[in-house]
C-alpha cells in the first residue's frame, strides 16, 4: 500500500502543529467559535449531539494492522472504547474532547493517517472498491488512481473552497461495488481493443435532498488525460456551481440545470485550453504510485485445500459463512473474507477497540497486513489463503464478528441518526436493530437472497436510502419520528433511485412493513434466481403497495 | 397529581470537551438536565439567553440555545425527542452519556 514520502510526513505533521496552536488559542479565548469552526472542520472535528466527533480519513478504505491498532488505541484512550465505520469508508469517534484532539491527530500522523478534508466544501476522501486488487472480476487495481486523486486533491488551492462538498469514487471492476453513479464524479475503468486502459467519467450523481443518477460525459477517457480532464470539470463547477443556495450547490444541480449536453460542452471547451505538459508529469507520478500497490507475493496454491474442505463438510455454520461472506479471489487458492459489522440486533458499522485489534491481528497474520473498510460499513481481509479460513472464522466467531449475512437482509446500512447526529431528524440505529432481529433467521435471509436495506436519519442520506433495494428515511412529523419507505433503488452499475411507496410508518411499524414487502416478493418472484431488485423492476410498486396499505 | 411546569431551559456544549451542559438557577452549568433553570416568563427566558451569550463570550460553552422542557416532581424532561436524546445519551447505548450517570429507572423512563 501507499507509504508517505518525506513531503507527506512533513505536511501532516505541520498540520498537527497548526491545529494544536489553533485549539490552544480557542481554549484561551483568542479565537471565537465562528473563527475556530472552519479550522476544526478542516481537521474533521465536528460538534455533534453529545460531544465533539472526529472523522478520520481512511483513503480509499485501505489500511494496515498498525493503523487499525492505532484506531483501537485512540478508541480506548480518548473515546469510549469503540468507533463507527461509515458509508464513506471512514471512521468516526463520537466522544472526543477538544483538549485531546491535537494529541489524537499527532498519534494518527505517526501511522500516516489524518482527518484532513473529511469535512468542508472540498474534495473529500476518495472512495473505491473494497475488493480492489483482489476481486476476481477486476480489470486492474483502481487504488493507484485513487491515490493519485488523493494527492492531487489534497489542499489543492483552487478546489479548497468549492460551492459545496465533492465526492469522487473509482472502480476497476465491471460489477460496481463503489456506487460510482451516485457520486459527484464516478470513474469506471474500461479496456479497449488495443489493451489500453481508459476511464468512463460519470458526473453529477448524488443522493441527499435531490437524488440523481450521474451522466456519462466521456465513455473512454485515456488514462493519461485523467487529471487534466477532471480539472476541467472542477473548474466549470467552481465557476458556475451555485453559491447562493446551499441546497442547490452540488454539481448534480449544475449538470441538471444546464443539461448534460451543455455541461459536457462547457467541460470540453475548458479542457481544450489545457496544456499537454501537465499530462506527462501525472503519468510519471502514476507509475511511481503504482509501485506501492504491487500485488503481494502470492503462493502458488492448488485449488484443493484439504483442511478447508474437511471443515466445510463437518461444520455447517462455517460452511454457511463461507457461502455468504467469502468472495472469490483473482488468485487461485486465495479468498476475500468479508467481516460483517452487523451482528443480529447490533449497531451497523460499530466495532470495539478489542474487535479492531482482533481484525488487525488477523490481517497481519493472514492477509499480507492489509485491511479494507467497505462503504457497506463492513471490513475486509482481502488476501486470505483458503487453508486459513477455518482458523480465521473461529477467531472472528469468538469475538462476535462472524455474522454470516453479507449482502443479505441483516447486512443493513444505517447512518448514526438521531442517537448521535446533530442534523438527524429521526433515529436510524434502532430501526436497523428491529429489522435485524426480525430477519435473524439466517436460513430465511438466505432464502430471500440479495437484499440491500439502507436507513438514513435525515434527508442528507448518509445511509444512502435512495439506493437501497428497500430504503428507509427517518423524518420528524410534529415532534414524532416517522419513516418513509422507498423501493427499487440500487447503487450498482444499473443504478436507480428508489421510489416512495406510500405514506410513512411509525418506528414500531417498520419491521412489519419490511416483512410484508419481503413476503410479497417471496410470493411473486419467478424463482429463487430472481432477486428482490429484479422482481421489483418487473412487478412495479403496485403489489407492494397493496400488501402495505390495502388492509388499512 | 403532581404539578407539571412547562417552560424553557438553556443548553450548550462545554467548550473544552463538548459535554452537553445546562444553565442552572445559580448561573452555573450542570451536566444534569434536572438541575436546569426552567424559565416560564418571557423576561426569564431572555435572561437565560443573555447568560448563555455571556458564557460563550467567556469561552466556557459554545452553541447555546433554548429548548422546551417540563418539570415534574423535581425531574426535568425535554419535550422533543432530539433534546431528550441529547440530555440523556444515545438510546442504543444506555451505558453511555448522561443516562449512564443517572439512577436507572427514571432516566430510562423518559426516553420513551
Image (spheres, coloured by chain):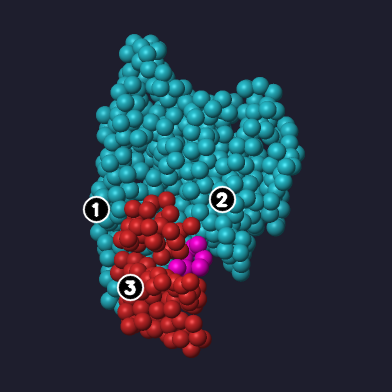
Q: CA distance from mark 1 to mark 3?
A: 25 Å
Magenta span contains residue B80 = yes
SS for dot 3: strand
Callout 2: SS: helix
Pointer 1 residue: A77
Residue drawn 62% across the image and 28% down it? A531
Tags 2 and 1 on a common chain: yes
N-terminal-most mark, 2 or 1:
1
Q: Is residue A9 visible?
A: no
Chain letter for the red part: B
Q: Secondary structure at mark 1?
A: helix
Q: Nearer the observer, disc 2 or disc 1? A: 2
Label 2 sits on residue: A507
Out of A198 and A487, give the one closest to the viewer. Answer: A487
Q: Quadrant of the N terminus of chain A?
A: top left
Q: Nearer the viewer, mark 1 or mark 3?
A: 3
Relative image position of residue A124 (x, y in whole percent): 46, 53
- Counting labels gives 3
Q: Residue furthest bottom?
A: B43
A542 relative to A266, above or below: above
Callout 1 touching callout 3 (CB < 8 Å): no
Residue A171 magenta: no
Distance of label 2 from label 1 (alpha carbons): 35 Å
The hue used for chain A is cyan
Q: Which mark is residue B30?
A: 3
For residue A317, which quarter of the picture?
top left
Image coords of residue A54 (percent x, y): 37, 57
Amino acid at each position: 500500500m501507499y507509504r508517505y514520502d518525506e513531503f507527506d510526513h512533513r505536511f501532516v505533521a505541520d498540520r498537527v502543529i497548526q491545529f494544536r496552536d489553533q485549539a490552544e488559542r480557542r481554549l484561551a479565548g483568542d479565537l471565537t467559535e465562528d473563527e475556530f469552526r472552519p479550522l476544526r472542520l478542516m481537521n474533521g472535528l465536528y460538534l455533534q449531539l453529545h460531544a465533539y466527533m472526529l472523522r478520520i480519513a481512511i483513503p480509499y478504505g485501505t489500511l494496515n494492522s498498525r493503523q487499525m491498532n492505532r484506531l483501537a488505541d485512540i478508541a480506548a484512550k480518548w473515546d469510549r472504547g469503540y468507533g463507527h465505520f461509515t458509508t464513506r469508508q471512514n471512521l468516526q469517534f463520537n466522544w472526543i474532547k477538544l483538549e485531546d484532539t491535537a494529541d489524537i491527530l499527532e498519534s494518527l500522523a505517526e501511522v500516516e493517517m489524518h482527518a484532513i478534508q473529511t469535512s468542508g466544501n472540498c474534495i473529500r476522501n476518495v472512495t473505491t472498491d473494497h475488493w480492489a486488487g483482489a476481486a476476481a472480476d477486476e480489470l486492474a487495481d483502481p487504488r493507484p488512481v485513487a491515490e493519485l486523486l488523493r494527492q492531487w486533491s489534497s489542499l489543492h488551492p483552487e478546489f479548497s473552497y468549492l460551492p459545496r462538498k465533492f465526492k469522487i469514487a473509482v472502480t476497476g471492476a465491471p460489477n460496481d461495488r463503489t456506487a460510482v453513479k451516485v457520486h459527484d464524479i464516478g470513474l469506471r475503468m474500461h479496456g479497449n481493443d488495443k489493451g489500453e486502459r481508459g476511464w468512463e467519467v460519470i458526473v453529477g450523481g448524488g443522493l441527499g435532498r435531490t437524488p440523481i443518477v450521474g451522466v456519462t460525459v466521456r465513455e473512454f477517457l485515456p488514462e493519461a488525460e485523467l487529471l487534466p480532464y477532471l480539472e476541467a470539470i472542477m473548474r466549470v463547477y467552481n465557476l458556475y456551481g451555485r453559491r447562493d443556495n446551499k441546497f442547490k450547490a452540488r454539481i448534480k444541480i449544475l449538470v441538471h440545470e444546464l443539461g448534460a449536453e451543455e455541461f459536457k460542452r462547457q467541460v470540453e471547451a475548458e479542457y481544450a485550453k489545457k496544456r499537454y505538459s501537465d499530462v506527462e508529469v501525472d503519468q510519471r507520478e502514476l507509475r511511481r504510485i503504482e509501485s506501492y500497490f504491487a500485488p503481494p507475493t502470492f503462493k502458488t496454491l492448488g485449488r484443493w485445500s484439504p483442511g478447508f474442505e474437511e471443515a466445510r463438510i463437518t461444520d455447517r455454520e462455517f460452511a454457511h459463512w463461507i457461502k455468504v461472506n467469502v468472495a472469490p479471489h483473482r488468485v487461485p487458492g486465495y479468498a476475500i473474507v468479508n467481516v460483517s459489522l452487523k451482528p443480529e440486533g447490533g449497531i451497523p458499522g460499530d466495532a470495539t477497540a478489542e474487535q479492531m485489534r482482533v481484525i488487525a491481528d488477523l490481517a497481519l497474520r493472514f492477509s499480507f497486513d492489509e485491511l479494507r473498510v467497505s462503504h457497506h460499513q463492513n471490513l475486509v481481509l482481502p488476501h486470505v489463503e483458503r487453508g486459513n479460513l477455518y482458523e480465521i472464522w473461529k477467531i472472528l466467531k469468538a469475538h462476535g464478528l462472524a455474522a454470516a449475512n453479507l449482502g443479505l437482509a441483516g447486512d443493513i446500512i444505517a447512518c448514526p441518526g438521531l442517537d448521535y447526529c446533530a442534523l438527524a431528524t429521526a433515529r436510524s440505529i434502532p430501526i436497523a436493530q428491529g429489522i435485524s432481529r426480525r430477519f435473524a433467521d439466517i436460513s430465511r435471509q438466505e432464502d430471500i437472497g440479495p437484499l440491500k436495506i439502507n436507513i438514513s436519519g435525515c434527508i442528507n442520506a448518509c445511509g444512502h436510502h435512495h439506493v437501497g433495494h428497500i430504503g428507509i428515511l427517518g423524518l420528524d412529523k410534529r415532534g414524532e419520528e416517522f419513516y418513509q419507505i422507498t423501493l427499487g433503488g440500487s447503487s450498482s452499475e444499473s443504478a436507480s433511485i428508489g421510489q416512495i411507496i406510500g405514506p410513512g410508518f411509525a418506528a414500531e411499524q417498520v419491521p412489519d412493513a419490511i416483512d410484508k414487502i419481503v413476503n410479497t416478493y417471496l410470493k411473486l418472484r419467478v424463482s429463487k434466481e430472481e432477486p428482490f431488485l429484479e422482481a421489483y423492476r418487473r412487478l412495479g410498486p403496485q403489489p407492494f403497495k397493496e400488501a402495505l396499505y390495502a388492509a388499512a | 397529581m403532581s404539578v407539571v411546569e412547562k417552560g424553557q431551559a438553556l443548553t450548550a456544549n462545554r467548550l473544552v470537551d463538548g459535554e452537553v451542559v445546562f444553565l442552572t438557577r445559580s448561573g452555573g452549568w450542570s451536566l444534569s438536565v434536572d438541575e436546569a433553570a426552567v424559565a416560564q416568563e418571557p423576561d426569564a427566558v431572555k435572561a437565560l439567553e443573555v447568560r448563555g451569550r455571556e458564557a460563550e463570550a467567556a469561552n466556557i460553552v459554545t452553541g447555546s440555545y433554548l429548548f422546551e422542557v417540563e418539570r415534574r416532581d423535581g425531574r426535568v424532561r425535554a419535550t422533543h425527542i432530539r433534546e431528550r436524546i441529547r440530555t440523556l445519551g444515545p438510546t442504543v447505548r444506555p451505558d453511555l452519556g448522561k443516562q449512564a450517570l443517572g439512577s436507572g429507572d427514571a432516566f430510562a423512563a423518559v426516553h420513551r
